[in-house]
Each structure stands twice: as C-alpha cells, then as structure tokens.
Amino acid sequence: MIIPGPLNSPVWTAPEIAEAVNGRIVRWAQPGSVSTDTRSIHPGQWFLPLVGQNFDAHTFITPQLSANGVIGVIGNRVCENWDMGFVQVDGSTTESLKRLAMFARKRFSGCLIGLTGSVGKTTTRAMLALALESIGSVYQSPGNWNNDIGVSLSLLGMPGNVGFGVLEMGMSKRGEILELTGICRPNVRVILNVGAAHLENFASLKEVSIAKGEMLRDATMGDVCVLNADDPLVMDLAVPAGVKKVLFGRREGSDVRLVSIQSIDGGLKVETVLETKEEMVKFVIPSPGLHLALNACAAAAVATSLGVPLALVGKSLSRFIPVPGRCEFQVTTNGINIINDVYNASPVSTKHALDSLSDIHCCGRRVAILGDMLELGPTEIKLHELILQHCLDTRVDLVALVGKRFLAAANNLQVGQEINMLHAYDSESLASDILEYLHCGDLVLVKGSRGIKMEKIVHAIKSYSSNNVQRQFYC
C-alpha cells in the first residue's frame, strides 16, 4: 500500500512538541498533527507559522483560526484573546519545523530512502514506491516537496508504522543537500544524474556534482548508496568506507543493468529489459518516453537491494502512471493530443520531451510549445539554442516559444527561416494566439519551467471547442 502525505499524519502531544523544538508550553492542547498552511489546515491540527523575507504567517493567528478547529500554535507569539494551545519558541520557526522533522525521523523505525538528481527525481520516486509496495507499506513525499521545508513537512506527515519512506531532495546551491540528509538521515541514498540545472549558482557541472555528492558525505556503516553507472560525474563521487554501493545503468557490471529499451504501441509505451546477476525481466512501462527506462532501472536497483525480486519489480512498474504534469499523454475532445510536461524544464528533460514528441505516432503535425528554462546562469542562451537545434533535428513542424531567452536563442540561430515559429513573452498571451494554428490530429508538446506557467496553454487547448478546430486530417 502506498500512503501519500499528508494523509494519516502522526499526532503530536504538547510535551513532544516542546521537547522537539526546545519550546515552552504556555497553554496545553489535545494531541494533533502539524500544518504550516492556513489554506489547507484541518480541524484538530497545530499551526506552525513560517516567517520569510516578505511574509510572517503569525499574522494569520486570529480567533477565527481557533473557530475553524485549530487546536494550538507552535510559534513566537499568538494574538490577543487566543484561547487554544500555545507552545512558544524563540528564534526562527523554520528551524523549529526542522527540529520537529528530526524528532519525527528519530521515532521512525522503517527504511528511509532519499533520492536526488538533476532530472527524474519525482518520476523515480513514484516508480520506487510502486516497486516497494509489493513487500510493505510505503510513504512518499507529496508533490515535489524536496527543499528544506518540503522535506521537513514530508517527515512530519510520515506515519511511524510504514515500512518504507521515499523522499526526494532538491537543491539550488551548495550545502542544501547536506542539510537535508542531516534532517532525514537516509538509509538508502540515490543519485540519479548530474545535469544542467540551477547553473546560476554554479560555475560548472563539476560543481553541481560536488553539491549532489553531499548526499553521500554523512553516510554511515550499513547505509546503501545507489549510483548511476553511466554518469561519469556521479561515478567520480567518493563513497564513504563501509557503505554498500549499488550501480544501475547500461554499463556492463552494473548491479541492475538496462539491457534494452524499445518504443512500442505507437510510441505510447516503453518495452524495457533489465537484468541482475541472478535474473532478467522484460516489462512494459505504459507511458511514453524512452528516458523512463533509466528511471525504472534506478528504482529497480533500490528495490532489489532491499530484497524485492526483479521479476516483481517489473510487474509493479508495468502499472506505472505518469506523475501529473510530467510527460502525460492526454487525448482531448477536440482531437488535439497533448504531451503535458509543464511541471518544470531543464535542457536534459526538454530534450527527452522532444524525443517523445518525435516517437509518438500522430496523423497531424508535431508541435512543440516551449517555455523558457530558468536558473541556467551565464550559458542560458546557448542552452536554449541547443534545444532549438534539437527541434530542427527532430523535424518539429511548428515551434511556439514563450519567454525572452528562447526569443534571443531563436534570433541567434535565425530559426524562423528554417521552421514555422511563433513567439510570446508570457504563456497567457500564447495561450490565446496558438489555438488558431492547431488542427485536429496534431500532437502538441507543452513544456517549460515552473515559473513560466505553461499549464495555462494546456488548459486553453483542452478548453478549445471541437467546432473551432480545423479538421485537416482524419482523426
């Protein structure tokens, strides 16, 4: 059974909270789970107000909050006439959240798996949860809760009686992964890859690999480190003595080897063959994207290291469903098919998405709607140029671009002279312009960084009346 957070979150007593955060019980309250968001808080929960550069959630502590069923506050202060529980803390409430998370980790007796990588974290996490549920109950972090606050909330939401916890860990600068491993102390540590992401804070991919390598730094005797054998930057990372190293990838000698992959069923599924020293398994991932096979290989490496037979891993992964917003193939009522990959974008993941666009059969045109890739630093325009070149190489029929970076790259390459191209500076503008260019039977990839809000374009295409769509092809 897979248990997504924050359902069934463990409850905390006032003394436990005070001990965890080194706080003082000003007013007692009944036990309850903890929330940091008044928009989604439920009756019977404690509220922990976070404070940032431009906000202070203590301002949401009002009598109305208690009227809505909140049983107490863990914070610096409360409002006048607050009549519910109050555990007072000094200093940063974000640090108090992390202390709660570390306390939660101490009382968790199951196996905790932490994974990081420049791309593929969320998909691999979902695959791993599927593979592990065959031998026990599994909790996985919700959404992409992979920063210090997200990881802490994931730990708070993890039931103490599950067998496995699977958490993803992200970073944008050095030191962040090390902090996250210090909070959750993973028993199994996974590094999927090192690629061009968050380069605005790094001078090179080597520096990115060093930051990702913090996942391994405080591993101790008995921990398992699962590494991508095909990635030289990952393989260069030092693994502490006494730690079991498990390798996955295409490389000969990998503990779990990706033997072969093949796009089937018109590009909508991926036939995958994996092997260990003891067995081989063939299965079909029911989703487009050849890159998913390596994610499956990583999940299999973790699962088999924890005792799951490879055949059972294959059976589990044959039930994989794409995470929302990540390479989802969607059939609309108006005859336009969408590859919805809007959640985020990097050069590697965008290239993978374009390859999927090329592989999937369609009776119309292949259309790539691409939003800027953010946080790429000084080389950002060059990296956008490489993506546009890949559009040309894969013979995309129409490219629609959102953002100033893709526009600069397109001007540099004079892409408009070689391919049909549209451009807008924001997704809302393109959402209204693109519709007149789409036909029944077209296959449309929509992808961009989170900050570009490419989901607006997906919504516009889905909402477009079938009466308005040009029917130039048999669907």
Image (spheres, rainbow, N blue to C red):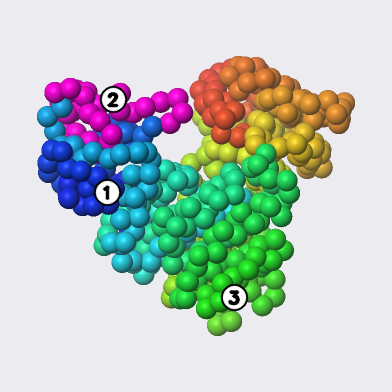
Q: Quadrant of residue 94?
A: top left
Look at label 2 and name its amino acid: Phe
Q: Quadrant of residue 420?
A: top right
Q: Quadrant of residue 358?
A: top right
Q: Is residue 357 left or right of residue 320?
A: right
Q: Up-down: is 7 above or below 447?
A: below
Distance from Cα at disc 3 to Cα at disc 2: 52 Å
Distance from Cα at disc 2 to Cα at disc 1: 23 Å
**Region of the chain picked out in magenta, as a range:** 52-81
Tell which of 356 and 223 is nearer to you.
223
Look at the image and tell me in which quarter the C terminus lies: top right
Which residue in the protein does label 2 denote? 60
Which residue in the protein does label 3 denote? 255
Which residue in the protein does label 1 denote? 22
Look at label 1 and name its amino acid: Asn
For the residues labelled 1 and 3, say whether their Cβ atoms are less than 8 Å apart: no
For the residues labelled 3 and 2, say whether their Cβ atoms are less than 8 Å apart: no
Residue at figure coordinates x 60%, y 60% from the top left = 213
- Disc assigned to residue 416: none
